[in-house]
Amino acid sequence: MLVRSLLALSALSWPGLLLAQDGAPSVTLESGTRVPLSLINSVSTKHSVEGDRVYLETVFPILSSGHIVIPPGSYVSGTVTEVKRPGRVRGRGELFLRFDTLTLPNGVTRDFRARLGGIDGRGGEELDRAEGKVRSEGNKGGDARTIGEAAGAGASIGAIAGGAAGHLGMGAGIGSAAGAAAGLMGVLLSRGPEAILAKGSTIEMILDRPLNFELSELNFNGGMAPGHFSEGAGGPAPSSKNSGSIPRRRLPY
């Protein structure tokens, strides 16, 4: 009874610190908490299909009530729920992601639900925050450039052919029209830019539901060391023979 009373007083002293049903103190991350992540594998409208798994790791500690709840190096897995490739004439590529599971460095795991809240600004993709989907950039400028380049090349060839036949202006006009038609055909047969979230990109997820942990689950001493797969496999592990101390330099006298 005394222990429970002390725990209750601790909960009052730390806002957000609650008591679980068995009386153990717990910490809750509220709905709307933002968690920055780094992608371990790439996702794109060209190579991904519905149901593919997405693997990520946390890159910044998330705290609540003075406790680190999600340390860097925790693992998050998600699912590609929908893929829409860009159209040949119109339409952008679209990706929908859902986050499913969180694993802390000490092995504690939670199933949860979260949505995409932000994407790396280095690419040309856009995020529809209301629907949580990633759109590829448009390519109207590229299409116009393709048609213009083809028309220019056609005009040059037509001018050469027309000059040889004594009809320079007519040849240039016919060549320009033919080149523009060829460029338009090329645009109609090719797709627009794909939507890509590259390996190592930083994205942000937002919790859709509260996430609760007992304080005993947040002990990260002696837990498995977090890896950073988004940066590559890394070099070989250091030898245990040299892990104790720094070797001394031998003086020249």
Image (cartoon, helix red, strand yellow):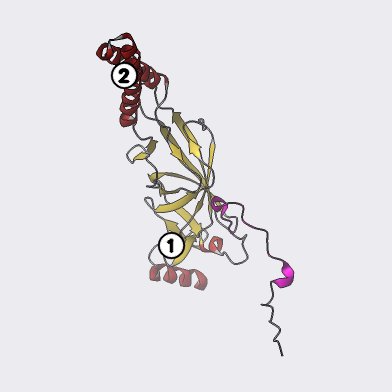
Asked whether residue 221 is in view, the answer is yes
Q: Which element carries disc 1, helix, strand or loop? A: strand
Numbered badge on residue 157: none
Q: Which mark is residue 63?
A: 1
Q: For numbered disc 2, what is the local secondary structure?
A: helix
- Above-or-below relation of 131 to 212: above
Foreground label between 2 and 1: 2
Q: Image point 63% across, 65% down: which residue?
A: 222
Q: Residue at x 50, y 73 (%)?
A: 2
Quadrant including the C terminus: bottom right
- Sequence order check: which comes first, mark 2 or mark 1? 1
Most foreground residue, 152 or 122: 152
Q: Residues within 10 Å of mark 2 (few under 14, many from 20)?
A: many
At label 1, which amino acid type do we have?
Leu
Mark 1 surroundings: few (<14), some (14-19) or many (≥20) residues within 10 A: some
In percent of width and height, residue 87 lies at: 39, 23
Dominant SS of magenta comes to: loop
Q: Which residue is mark 2?
A: 155
The residue nearer to you, when weighing 115 against 198, is: 198
In the image, residue 77 lies at what x, y percent?
53, 45
**Residue 243 placement (x, y as % from top left):** 69, 71
Q: Residue extending furthest bottom?
A: 253
Span highlighted in magenta in the image: 226-244
Q: Give how far apart the Cα atoms at labels 2 and 1 are.
A: 65 Å
Return the residue found at the far left.
169
